[in-house]
Amino acid sequence: MKTIRTPDDRFDDLPGFPYAPNYAEVSADGTDGATLRVHYLDEGPADADPIVLMHGEPTWSYLYRHMIGPLVDAGHRVIAPDMVGFGRSDKPTEQGDHSYARHVEWMTGLVFDHLDLRHITLFCQDWGGLIGLRLVAAEPDRFDRVVVGNTGLPTGHGAPSEAFLAWQSFSQSADDFPVGAIIGAGCTTELSADVVAAYDAPFPDDAFKAGPRVMPALVPTSTADPASAANIAAWEVLGSFERPLLTAFSDGDPITAGGAAPFESKVPGAQGQQHSVIKGGGHFLQEDRGPQLASVIDRFIADNPVDTPQ
């Protein structure tokens, strides 16, 4: 597996992002001892229960800059990883080296093996949900609470939306893949030029974009997809997950519209919760309504104390 690493100076002086990097080595493919360096932010008191914020496609932990400060100020420890292929994490250069299963394994290596996190409150959006919810299904006892926003856990049943199919086609066929501009198009707020440049920072040229390019094609859209069976099994676990689960979807995302309903109807821990609709947010609701979303998560934790000796 050939990998490249974004030069550190690409991350100098990004607007609103004063956070120090942290790194862990995880197994690249579980066979030859090769490793990948994975980046994560770790802010707030080290002895507090962790909130894990998982980003998706084609963003990185910069997406959470409006939320980290308010959550830390509320007394929480906040951990925001960069998926392999994104942010400061190492980037396999071949699209074929990325698979859904590998991305789950890479985040497992960070969250469970390296950090050994427990009493987790997870917030996940976009691919952060596709990966993060698989972690919940693998070791549910590590998670005290789950918040899902603008995401899903697709099994390949049912037809994907036209908006998603258009995005999937674009990702595979476009000559240019302007990450920052793509993120801007998924927001309801207009991003300044320096913020767009910050989203572009991990990707100096197309050689760094194998991950962002391939991820839309890895979403299961039929039951023949290699990830379909694993996601079906994960839903079986979520179908008996009794710890609190909250939906916090925005009202302005055509790709995930209606995606809260399966969680609210199928997960026992979602019953009786005050599910939120984040008004005025686009697909990247963390960018559009970050402080509001942080407040929703903080209130959800306060309203749902969990006594789970581990």
Image (cartoon, helix red, strand yellow):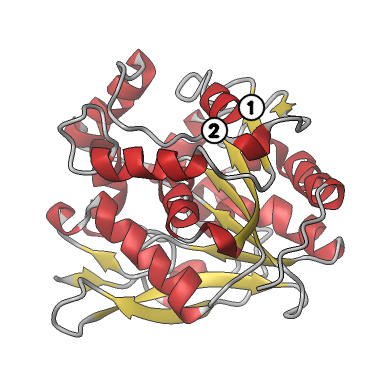
Asked if residue 178 is positioned above or below residue 82 in the image, the reply reads: above
For the point 36% across and 16% down, the residue is 161
Query: Is residue 118 rendered to the left or right of residue 168?
Result: right
Residue corresponding to mark 2: 150
For the point 53% across and 57% down, the residue is 140
- State if disc 1 and disc 2 touch (CB < 8 Å): yes
**Real-space Cα separation, disc 2 to disc 1, in angstroms:** 7 Å
- Asked where in the image residue 3 lies, by quadrant, the reply is bottom left
For the point 26% across and 55% down, the residue is 101
- Asked where in the image residue 250 lies, by quadrant, the reply is top right
Task: Identify which amino acid the numbered label 2 is placed on.
Answer: Asn
Q: Residue furthest bottom?
A: 33
Mark yes or no: residue 228 visible. Answer: yes
Query: Is residue 279 rendered to the left or right of residue 194?
Result: right
Image quarter in which the N terminus is found: bottom left
Residue corresponding to mark 1: 250
Q: Position of residue 215 (x, y in %)?
A: 29, 44
Q: Position of residue 224 (x, y in %)?
A: 15, 32
Query: Is residue 112 rendered to the left or right of residue 158?
Result: right
- Decide which of tag 2 and tag 1 comes sooner along the chain: 2
